[in-house]
Every structure is written in C-alpha cells, then in structure tokens.
Image: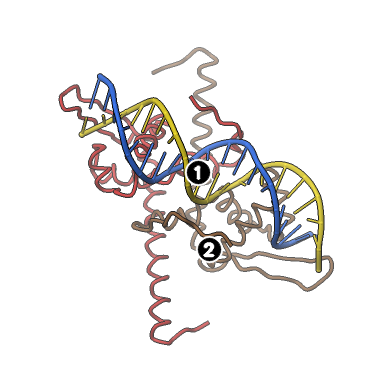
Chain colours: A brown, B red, C yellow, D blue
DNA sequence: CGGTATCCAAGCGGATACTG
DNA sequence: CAGTATCCGCTTGGATACCG
C-alpha cells in the first residue's frame, strides 16, 4: 500500500472540498450517477477519455468518503451499481454550479473567438 | 517554456471549471483577495504552507484567465495588488460553497470522532 | 517586495494485460 | 462485467537561490 509523504493541509474548508472533489473525474462521476448512470460500464461509456482504472479508483475514493454507496448484485456476469448517499446529494448544488459556470465561461470564450474572426477585436 | 503533452479534455463544463479552479491554492486565493488581501505578501502570510513560487504561478494563471487583475505600483520597494474582475466575482458563490461545504463536512467528521470516544458509535 | 530560474520529489493518471 | 496489478510518463508543486 502506498503512503503519502506530504501531509495534506486541511486548514480551511476549501481544502477539504478539494480533497474530495478535486480528482479529474470525481465531480463528473457524481453528476453522472445523479443523472441515472449507476453502472460502471455506463459511466465508462459516458467518459471515454477516462481509463477504466482511474474511474475505478475515483469511485473507490468517493465511496471511502461516504459520498457514494456501492451495491454489488451477486449475479453472473457481475453487476454493480453506485448511488449517491446523503453526503453525495449535498454536493449536487456544488457540482451543478461547476457545470453551469464552466459552460457559461466556455461560451463566452467561444464568442470572443468569433468576434476575432469577424475582425471585431475590442480591448 | 513548457508545453503540455496531454491534451486537456474540455467536453463538459465541469472540466473547464476544474481547469481554472483546480489548482491547489486557486480557490483560496480568490477567497482571500475577495476578503481584502490584495498584496502578494499578505497572501503569502495567510497561506504559510504555500511556497512563494506556487502562489506566483497560480496568480499568474488566474490573471491569464481573466479572473483577477494585476495592478503594479511603480514605487520602491515594489508594490503589487491583485483584484477580482467580473469573471472572478462570478466565481465567488462557487468558492463560498466550497468553503461552507468543506467546513460542515469537517465538523461532521469531528463529531463522528467524538461519538466514538464516548462510545456512541452508531451505524 | 515581487518575481523568476533551477532542480527535483511526489503523485496523479494513462496504457495494457490479466483475474474472477 | 468489474476490478486490479504493473509500469511509467507527465504534471504539479515544494525548496532554494538569485535578480530587479
């Protein structure tokens, strides 16, 4: 087992939140699970740029922090489902805000590009 | 200059937000600047665990994305101030939510610890 | 005081192959 | 299908010294 060598800094609430939500795919996973994608294969299909290993890892961390709950169905082929816990649901406003802000910022970015193409660069 | 080798994935809004806010100290910096700490030395004093170099880097990135604005006073010794732009202010609700959620989660965490000490562990 | 150059450790995460 | 083991590249960021 790997042991971290640099102690985490939890002086402020922000660092706690980043610890739990900071992973590359964690907020996306919470969002996807909330939208009804419960099985790992569904999640993988919806995030083709994430490797199976990393998705597994981040799901495991989210589970360890009590953000999601794992349900294993004892069938063949294996079937697993993840669900948000109460803690996980309390994160939804944050996730939504991240999604919304990012989308708006992206479109503003694109608008600037368009303006440049039309030659209307304004400082 | 260093050039990234792994293309960033900006498929969803969340990844944009993480690109801008994902740095170890960026949300803290936005929060601190908003609370009136405008000079690098103040920011450094308030985040003793962050090295001067990293603070500089992250401030520069925030500036590049138009989240903060840098004001250089041509005096000796040098005096620099950072201010939130409109974009930066639009991030404040997100930062506040991160701070609040993290603080609550931390106290819940501590409560569990206390309960264990008193022997009232309930599943 | 503010910023940068240099060096390097640590850790995150990508690719692949394998197990049950 | 779900998960893990292994390997390793890339990026982040910590430490320090130095410049304007």
Viewed as shown, does residue B106 lie left or right of A32?
Answer: left
As drawn, the label of residue B97 is none
Q: Nearer the viewer, residue C1 or B23?
A: C1
Estimate the x, y position of residue B13 in percent, counting from the top left. 55, 42
Could you tell me how far apart the alpha carbons at marks 2 and 1 are, in whole angstroms?
20 Å
Mark 2 lies on a secondary structure that is helix
Task: State which quarter of the image contains the C terminus of chain A.
Answer: top left
Which residue position holds label 1?
A: B18
Estimate the x, y position of residue B100 in percent, counting from the top left. 37, 58
Which residue position holds label 2?
A: A89
Q: Residues within 10 Å of mark 2 (few under 14, many from 20)?
A: some
**Outermost residue toward the right?**
A76
At 54% from the left and 14% from the top, the residue drawn is A118
- Above or below, B104 against B121 in this view is above
Estimate the x, y position of residue A69 in percent, counting from the top left. 61, 68
Q: Quadrant of residue B102?
A: bottom left
């Amino acid at each position: 087992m790997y042991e971290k060598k640099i102690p985490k800094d939890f002086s402020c609430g922000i660092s706690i939140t980043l610890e739990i939500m900071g992973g590359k795919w964690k907020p996306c996973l919470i969002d996807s699970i909330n939208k009804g994608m419960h099985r790992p294969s569904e999640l993988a299909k919806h995030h083709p740029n994430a490797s199976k290993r990393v998705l597994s890892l981040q799901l495991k961390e989210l589970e360890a922090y009590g953000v999601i709950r794992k349900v294993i169905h004892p069938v063949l082929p294996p079937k697993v489902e993840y669900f948000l816990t109460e803690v996980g649901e309390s994160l939804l406003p944050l996730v939504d805000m991240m999604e919304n802000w990012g989308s708006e910022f992206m479109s503003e970015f694109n608008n600037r590009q368009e303006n440049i193409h039309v030659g209307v660069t304004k400082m």
